[in-house]
Image (cartoon, rainbow, N blue to C red):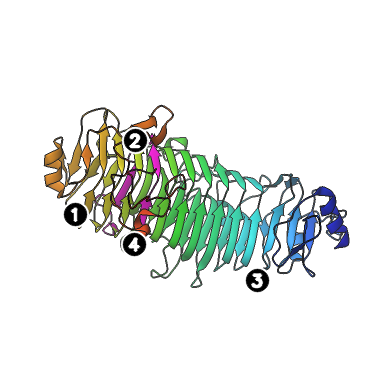
Amino acid sequence: MKRNINIFLMLGFVVQVFGCSKKNAVGVVIPPAGVHIYYVSASGSESNKGTIDAPFQTINNALSHTVPGDTVMVRGGTYSEKVVFPKSGIMDKYITLKAYHGEKPIIDGSAFSVNGREALITIDKAKFIVVDGFEIRNFKTSTGDPKAVMVAGGSDYIIIKNNVIYGIDYTQLPLNGGGNAILIIGNTTDPVTNITVSGNTIHDCKTGYGENLTINGYVDGFTITNNTIYNGQNIGIDAAGGYAANADPALNYARNGVISGNTLYNIESKRGPLGGYGAIGIYVDGGRNVVIEKNRVSVTDRGIGAVSETNGFPSDHVTIRNNLIYNCWRAGIYIGGYLNYTGAGTANSAIVNNTLYNNNRALGAFGEIEGEISIREDCTNNIIKNNIIYAGAADMFIHKYTAKGSGNVIDYNMYYTTGAAQWTWNGALYTDYNAWKAANGGDANSTNGVNPLFINTSGPDLHLQSSSAAKNSGQVISDVINGNTDFDGNARTVNQQISKGAYQ
C-alpha cells in the first residue's frame, strides 16, 4: 500500500471511499490497514497485480480480488465487458467501483448480444456496493431486454451515482418488451432495500414498453435523487407494482421511497414506436408510501402520475409536493385508475404545494382537455391543496372524469388562466367558479382569477414576486404532508405560514 499512498500524496487527491480512515499531516485520507485499491486500465494486463503501475485490464478481474472495504479504481478508456459483482461488502465497508479521479471510463455494450433480461452492470444478491462515475452506453437489441444497470435478488445498501447512461435501446418491432437504463427489481422473497440512485444523467434511450429508471416489485426503501433524464421515449421514473416482477402478490410492489430533486424533460412517446402522448415524467403505478417532491418536470407527455394499471394494486399514500410541472403535452398531475380499465385507483394521497403552468397543449385520448390536475376513476380520500394552477388559453384547471371515488378534499388552491376558466366534476363541465365549488363541495378557501405573479413566464421562472397573493395564503397541514423545505430547500413554513405553490 505504500506505493499507492505516495501516488495519492503527489496528486493531492483526497480519497473519500473508505470507512474507518484517518488523515495525515497534509490532510490526505489514508485507507486503514487491510483495505486495498485495485486499478484497472484498458492497456493493463490480467496477469498484473492491479497496482496503479501494473493495473488489471478488466473490471471483472479486479472485482474478483476484492474483499469488503476495497475499491476498484478504473482509468479512462473503453471497456467492452458485462460487469457482474461477485461479492458483497459489509456495513461500513462497501465494495466500491469508481472512476479514477478526472478520467472517464466507458462501459460499452456495442459488441454484445442480449439474452433475455441482461445488463452491462449487474448487482444480484449482493450488498454494500457503490458504482460511481461511469459512462455506460450502447447496449442495443431486437431480441432481449437490455439494461445499463440492474439491481436484483434481495440486494441491499446499493449506491448508483454520478453515471452517464445512453444508447440503451430496445429495437424489436412490433414491441414485445422493453429496456431500462436502470432497473431496481425485487424479484425474490428477500426485499431489495436501502437503494440510492443519485446524480446520474440518463438520455437518449429507446426503452419500448420499459422505462428509463424503474423500481419494480419487492423494493422496500429507495431514494431517487438529483438525476437528470431527457430525450426518452417512455416513462422517466417509475415506481411500480402489479406486474411480473415478483410471484407473490403481497410482495409485488415498490414501497417506502423518495423521488426528489430530479430534472426530467423531453420525455415523449413520439420519440419512439409507441407514438401518441403516453410518456410520463414521474410515475407511481401501484406503489405505496412514496414521496415525490421538488422535481422539475417539463415537456413530457404527462408530468407526474400516481395511478393504478393493475387490479388489486392501488397507488396508496403517495405524496406529490413542491414540484414544478410545466409545458407538458397533457395533464400536469393525474391520479386514479384508467377509465374502464382497472378498479384499484389512488387512495390516501396528497397533491400539495405544486406549481403547474401551461400544461395540456394537446388533447387527451378522447379529444378532451385532461386538466392541469386529472382525476380518473376510484380516487378515495385524497387531498389537493395549496397548488398554483396557471392554465393556458385552452386549458382546464381540474378534470374529474366520473363519479367513482369519494372523500377527496380540494381547497386552498390558486386558479388563474389566460383563457376561460373551466373545471369538470364527475363528467360535468363548469365555467362558473361558484357552481364548481358547489359541485365538488370544496375550494372554499381557494382563489380564482388572481394572477400569482411569477417572476417570468417566458423562461419560465416560476418563483413568486414579493407582492404575489400566493404568499403565505396556503394551509399548513403538517410537516409530513407539506414537507420541511420548499423547491429551493428553504423552510416550507415560516412563522406558521405557508405559501401556495412550490416556493415559499
Q: Is residue 301 visible?
A: no
Where is the N terminus found, in terms of image quarters? bottom right
Camera-nearest residue between 288 and 141 = 288
Marks 1 and 3, how far apart at CA: 50 Å
Q: Quick one: SS at disc 3?
A: loop
At 59% from the left edge and 58% from the top edge, which residue is drawn? 159
Q: CA distance from mark 3 to mark 4?
A: 34 Å
- Give the CA distance from mark 1 to mark 2: 25 Å
Which comes sooner in the sequence, label 1 or label 3? 3
Please tell me which of labels 3 and 2 falls first in the chain. Answer: 3
- Which residue is at 54% across, 61% downward? 195
Q: Where is 455 relative to 503, above or below?
A: above
**Neighbourhood count class around disc 3 (C-alpha, 10 Å): few under 14, some 14–19, many 20 upward:** some
- Identify the amino acid type marked 3: Ile
Q: Which numbered disc covers residue 359?
A: 2
Q: Which residue is mark 1?
A: 404
- Residue type at numbered disc 4: Phe
Mark pair 4, 1: CA separation: 17 Å
Mark 1 packing: few (<14 Cα in 10 Å), some, or many (20+)? some
* Residue 321 shown left or right of residue 43 in the figure: left
Judge depth for marks 3 and 4 and give the one in front.
3
Would you say residue 426 is visible in this rendering? yes
What residue did someone put label 3 on? 90
Residues shaded magenta? 318-346
- Mark 4 and mark 1 lie on one chain; the one further toward the N terminus is 4
Q: Earlier in the sequence, mark 3 or mark 4?
A: 3
Image-based side of 14 in relation to 346, left or right: right
> Callout 2: 10 Å neighbours few (<14), some, many (20+)?
many
Residue at numbered disc 4: 313
